[in-house]
Image (tube, rainbow, N blue to C red):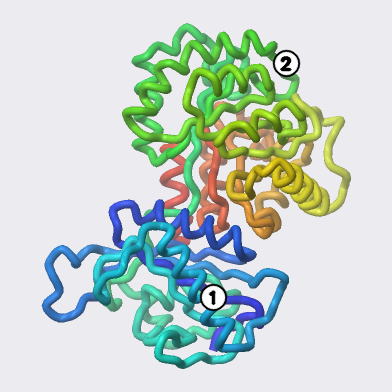
Amino acid sequence: MFNLAPDEFVIGLGSNSDNAISKFRLAKQCLQSQFHLLACSPIYSSDALLPDNAPENWNRPFLNAALRLRNEDNQAFSTTAQAHSLLLRLKQIEQALGRLPGPRWSPRVIDLDILAWGGPQIQSEELTIPHRELLERPFALLPLEDCIPEPASSTQSLCWRYSSPESVPFRTRRSASTWPEIVAILNITPDSFSSQAENLSGWTPERLEHFVTHHLNCGATVIDIGAESTRPGGVPTAPAEEIRRLEIVLPEISRLKKVHGFKLSLDSRNPRTVEHVLGQYSLDWINDVEGFTNPLMMKLARSSNCDLVIMHSLSIPPTQSKVLPAKPPYDILVPWARERIHACQNLNISRERIILDPGIGFGKTAAQNQALIRGISELQALGCRTLIGHSRKRFLDITQTISAGDRDLESAILSSSLSCSGTDYVRVHNSEFTQRALALGNFL
């Protein structure tokens, strides 16, 4: 019925909790760390499936989605025991994310179901594959078909897909919620390539509060602060100067973090700077454009609880004279990523803390940047979260006439294509355009 390889399966996700999209992202992260992620569906919204005489507070809209995954070591599914083992792992993830036992069809913090798999049909009291009543539930069938290259669409599913929500059971429709989280860039540099902050003294508490609240209102969940420009032709910044710049903003940013609860990321490759900030402020991420190749950075990473953004680069600042050789870029980046993951694990830094960044614009040609974005699944298959930092980069200017600060339109258009790519984070200057573009991409 569904075009799945013997080692593949599709998991349906559902939630009608207040933070449903956050639960989806956490569930995806858990599944991605255990299996190979192959595809994500758009996120859908639907009315609740309710029993007769359900309490009024059960009538809460659901978010729904699907993930297509491959079993570890390409092991084919062939037995009922494997199906029940997979179901048990899903139940463990549900429990870890806060699901408690409750009546059937009651509100769900997170619901994970095996919709289909490449093994034989299963019919037991505990489990049925393909999922029971799948063909009557558009909130499950439509995301499932989105994940499969050549779905065996029924006349009914085609009708659902091209009808207005009022004509589809449970008013199923695509949601404005999307998989990637937005990382907002805050450059505290006088020489940023995007001209975000020529006057460092201009970062008053009032301006910082406006910056943070604007980006949070536009969907950002992480604020990434950098005080050294890594633009082409940039001059390295001494750690003392980098720390001085950061101290202009970090007290107020830390206060705002306590108020609003966003994640705070430090964009720095200098161990002295990172050590200073870790000693004074609460950090969630360390973002190193040199990919934690400095042993002192690895030592700091091990002693902290921060997530680590590990970026690939050939030189800092990047130069056109040092780029990847003319071959598929992931032929180089996948072995690099495996080595960095292995180096982290040797220091007891778990895979769950790692975020891989292919380093768009750092030692890559325009064609290689495009190939890296299209093939981000190559990094996702390693079981770590991924981040794309394409915002305002030079390769977006195909006419060679647009300044860096004016490339938000191009950045947003590319963001829309990442909406259902499985990319976990997009690092951008303009959160408003990005949020709108991601939502549009969910509908395309």
* Three-letter amino acid code of the residue under disc 1: Leu
Quarter of the figure with residue 98: bottom left
Q: Residue at x 54, y 75 (%)?
A: 86
Amino acid at dot 2: Pro
Q: Residue 320 appears at what percent x and percent y? A: 82, 31
- Which residue shows up at 51% across the image and 43% down it? 412
Q: How many marks?
A: 2
At label 1, counting other C-alpha atoms closer than 10 Å, the crowd grade (few under 14, some 14-19, many 20 or more) is some
- Secondary structure under badge 2? loop
Q: Nearer the viewer, mark 1 or mark 2?
A: 1
Q: Is residue 98 left or right of residue 12?
A: left
**Dot 2 surroundings within 10 Å: few (below 14), some, or many (20 or more)?**
few
Instruction: Provide the residue designation for mark 2.
Output: 236
Q: Label 1: which residue? A: 86
What is the C-alpha distance between the residues marked 1 and 2? 50 Å
Quarter placement of the N terminus: bottom right
**Residue 7 vs residue 31: left or right?**
right
| Residue 259 visible from this viewpoint | yes
Along the viewing direction, whichever of 332 and 243 lies nearer the viewer: 243
